[in-house]
Image (cartoon, rainbow, N blue to C red):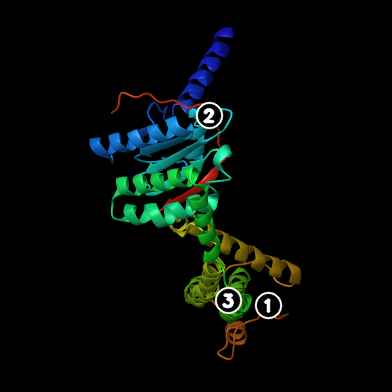
Amino acid sequence: MPKAVWSCILILVLSFANAQEDYPNLTQIVTDNAAIFSEEQLESLRSKLTQFESETTNQLVVLTIEELGDETIEGYANSTFNQNKLGQADKDNGILILFAEFDREVRIEVGYGLEPYITDAVASRIIRNTMIPYFKDEQYFEGIDMATDQIITFLNDPAALEEFKEEIASEGDMPWWVMLFVGLFLLMFVAAGGFIFYKSYASLLEMFRGIFIGKLGLLRGIFMMLFMLMPIAFSLVFILLPVFFMVEVFGWSPDYDSFFMNASWLLYGVVLFFVVTILLAIIKIVRKGKEDIKISFFKSDKKYMSKTFSKSGTHSFGSSSGSSSSSSFSGGGGSSGGGGASGSW
């Protein structure tokens, strides 16, 4: 028995050790694990950032990797930052630029002490306006080099940083009456899309109900539902596109690239859509209490079909009818709480 206990403890210790090794131990101020820099570029960047640290004690660190694996760039950056204790312990003045080549993502992770200066908005604008345009042309060194120049300038020159923040604030400035007009105009499209969705979804719901009570043949019902999904998809375009546009107009900057590159949310959404629809159809049947659940594969009730899916209109949802360098580097004991920004290209 003791042997088994010690074996379990050993396994846990080894697992913990392996987990700790998932993140790089940084021994250089620039670590190019993705091999995107030439030797000259690497030495130039290291020299600049080492000089910046010696002059200010701020640690601006660059790490490039090939891929993130199963982790988000935010989690990878924060864990790497805190594992290496970037920045000085009494100042938390570290910044990590993490570049993931194959994932096409980049993040600026900011230590607690520098968050009032390099805010999330500042980091996001540096990524969006400085880094990503270079990255799209595969000029990775240029993008990172320019970004580090900007960060160094902002931390050394409060006036330049304040001007930069004012530019960010002015980007979202818009007269209230213009915002109101745009909002009402786009709301018309949302309302139109919502109406189409309501009518189409009501018909889809009735199709499921008809199948479950045996009045709509299963094969015919599936064929009809495929056609009904087209106006539903069309209505969602009317609803979502104006919403995305309003988000941009009102100054928010969501990371659409990362959102659309991970298509798993679409699969989950479709599955959830059909599960909810099926449950609602069953609830309607149970609430009425006059019909038993039975399924007919081929036969449909002609009277039911004529009454429910006539050319005069669609069934209503609510209707009662059923509608390399020699220099060494190490962190100084700093930490980060996740401040910064991420981007992709």
Quarter of the image with the N terminus in it: top right
Question: Upstream in the sequence, badge 3 or badge 1?
Answer: 3
Look at 29% across and 37% down and name the residue there.
44
Q: Which residue is mark 1?
A: 322
For marks 3 and 1, give the CA distance: 17 Å
- In the orientation shown, which residue stands out farthest toward the top? 2
**Residue name at image x 38 percent, y 43 percent:** 100
Give SS at disc 1.
loop
* Residue 75: image location, x then y, percent: 51, 40
The amino acid sitting under disc 2 is Gln
Q: Residue at x 55, y 90 (%)?
A: 311
Q: How many marks?
A: 3
Q: Type of residue at label 3?
A: Phe
Q: Quadrant of residue 173?
A: bottom right
Secondary element at image label 2: loop
Q: Are marks 3 and 1 in contact (CB under 8 Å)?
A: no
- In depth, the one of 308 and 226 nearer the eye is 226
Q: Which residue is mark 2?
A: 88
Above/below status of 277 relative to 23 = below
For label 1, the crowd category at 10 Å Cα-Cα, with few meaning under 14, some 14 to 19 and many 20 or more, is: some
Question: What residue type is disc 1 on?
Answer: Gly
Residue 110 percent across, percent down from the top left: 52, 41
User: Which x, y percent locates residue 189?
Assistant: 56, 80
Q: Secondary structure at mark 3?
A: helix
Q: Which residue is mark 3?
A: 197
> Which numbered tag is attached to residue 157?
none
Residue extending farthest to the left is: 39
Mark found first going from the N terminus, 3 or 2: 2
Q: Residue 145 vs residue 12: left or right?
A: left
Q: Label 2 near label 1: C-beta < 8 Å?
A: no
Report, in whole angstroms, how far the alpha carbon at label 3 lies from the one at label 2.
56 Å
